[in-house]
Image: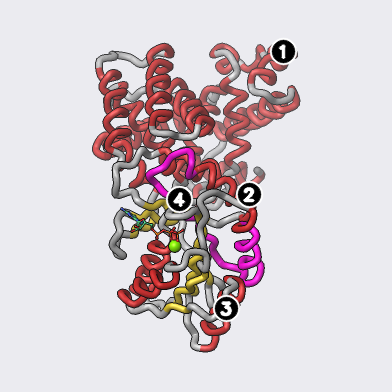
Amino acid sequence: MFDDLTAKLDQVFRNLRGVGKLTESNIKESMGDIRRVLLDADVNLQVARDFLARVEEKALGQQVLKSVSPAQFVIKIVHDELVLLLGEKESRLSSSPKPPTVHMVVGLQGSGKTTFCAKLARYLKAKGKRPLLVAADLQRPAAQEQLLVLGDSIGVPVFRGDSKNPVDVCDAAMRHARKISLDPVILDTAGRLHVDDDLMEELEKIRKLVQPTEILFVADGMTGQDAVNSARAFHDRLQFTGSVLTKLDGDTRGGAAISIRAVTSKPVKFVSVGEKLDALEPFYPDRMAGRILGKGDIVSFVEKAQSVMDEEQAAEMEAKLRRAEFTLNDFLTQLQQIKKMGSMQNLLGMIPGVGAKLKNMQVDERVFRHTEALILSMTPLERERPKILNASRRRRIARGAGQAVQDVNRLIQQYEQMVVMVKRMRKAGPGQIKRIFGEL
Ligand SMILES: Nc1nc2c(ncn2[C@@H]2O[C@H](COP(=O)(O)OP(=O)(O)OP(=O)(O)O)[C@@H](O)[C@H]2O)c(=O)[nH]1
Ligand SMILES: [Mg+2]
């Protein structure tokens, strides 16, 4: 699917195989190599930059596990960040509480809209739905005919209406669907060679009239930046709800697939992998990352090593808590752990009588990121001995993390409260620990 991209990334990781230890300079060098590979694949420049900054930060900030090689470690980080970039989790189609659900399909000429409409109808029919396809492309003479043939081949009715105006066709189609309880309604709209005002106005009118549940932007996956730029233009006008990547069966460069979600901030919902009508797959970010990197075995190996490490760390942390030697470094490690998988809950869960109470604790990611940035801009000595944090050090730390001195003060306050709590915990028996946490 992404043969060229996968091969080039593999070469970058190969170069890392020889290094015994990750250093700032070899990490930076690899990031430069990956950057070139991504730009070659026509990934959006800003997306590539942000992505690599996150990978680099993680690679520099995390401890390499003893059992894992530097190359494996970097592969795992690239994989995890790629999954996040691609949207983290599968994003399903919404359905309307007031049937029929309407999926409006939009995109440039030849991107694969009509084919996708038929594929989607087939997919939803197989799930027990009774879809209606609507031929709302009156631009191209043969467009309605094309949809009729496709609909016929999958046994899905196609509405074409007699009007010359696509808005009227959609209106009549909605009435028809309601009358005979067809649901969902899938609108195949016209494409243009470029984003133009006429098309956008037509699509806006249709949107206003039918109030679609989903507006799906179809992007030709063979292209890179072009697809992403038109996605942005469509999104500015129509605020689509998700996108579809087509033609991923060909030798695809990967730029569109990697950039589109980050640029539009809307999830990819499906990928289309062939001309046949069964060549449609829901989009799974982790699978896509796996296809791009081709390193599934290494990723799961590192995951296992990490989970062992997490358990060891949790036990060590608990011992520290009990000995009341809780430094800002420990605070940071805890934050990073919580961010990873809510393991603070696990850790606290190990203390009798505490676990259940904190099970449903809400975790605000942003607060974590800010706090983490503050601690990261301290020197190792400051993290071990927060007492030395005078006004000028606090100013420097705030500046380093792009935050205010008050934020540093607040962090130190939180930390001191934690230390007090830890001290009380040391004195307290299990019954009292429950009481202390109850006060928080
Ligand atoms: N290989 C491959 N070809 C595809 C895929 N999806 C669509 N196509 C082909 O791409 C061409 C254009 O597809 P259409 O579905 O007609 O595209 P469209 O966006 O409706 O085009 P217009 O209506 O002209 O704007 C057709 O030849 C399709 O068979 C895919 O996933 N893989
Ligand atoms: Mg079409």
Q: Quadrant of residue 131?
A: bottom left
Disc 2 target residue: 236
Disc 4 target residue: 219
Is label 1 in a helix, a strand or a loop?
loop
- Whether pointer 1 and pointer 3 mark residues with C-beta atoms closer than 8 Å, the reply is no
Disc 1 target residue: 390
Badge 1 local density, few (<14 within 10 Å), some, or many (20+)?
few
Whether ligand 2 has any atom under 8 Å from the Cβ at mark 3 is answered as no
- Whether pointer 4 and pointer 1 mark residues with C-beta atoms closer than 8 Å, the reply is no
Is label 4 in a helix, a strand or a loop?
strand
- Rounded to the nearest angstrom, the CA distance separating label 4 from label 1 is 55 Å
Q: Is residue 322 visible?
A: no
- Whether pointer 3 and pointer 2 mark residues with C-beta atoms closer than 8 Å, the reply is no
Q: Position of residue 204 (x, y in %)?
A: 64, 62
Q: Which is closer to the viewer, label 4 or label 3?
A: 3
Q: Which is closer to the viewer, label 3 or label 2?
A: 3
Q: Is residue 284 left or right of residue 385?
A: left
- From this view, report whether residue 92 is shown above or below residue 400: below
Q: Amino acid at mark 4?
A: Ala
Q: Quadrant of the C terminus?
A: top right
Q: Which mark is residue 163?
A: 3
Q: Position of residue 379 (x, y in %)?
A: 57, 13
The residue positioned 51% from the left and 62% from the top of the image is 190
Q: Nearer the viewer, residue 104 or 423?
A: 104
Q: Which is closer to the viewer, label 4 or label 1?
A: 4
The residue positioned 53% from the left and 27% from the top of the image is 332
- Rounded to the nearest angstrom, the CA distance separating label 4 from label 2 is 15 Å
Q: Nearer the viewer, residue 81 or 221?
A: 221
Q: Amino acid at mark 3?
A: Ser
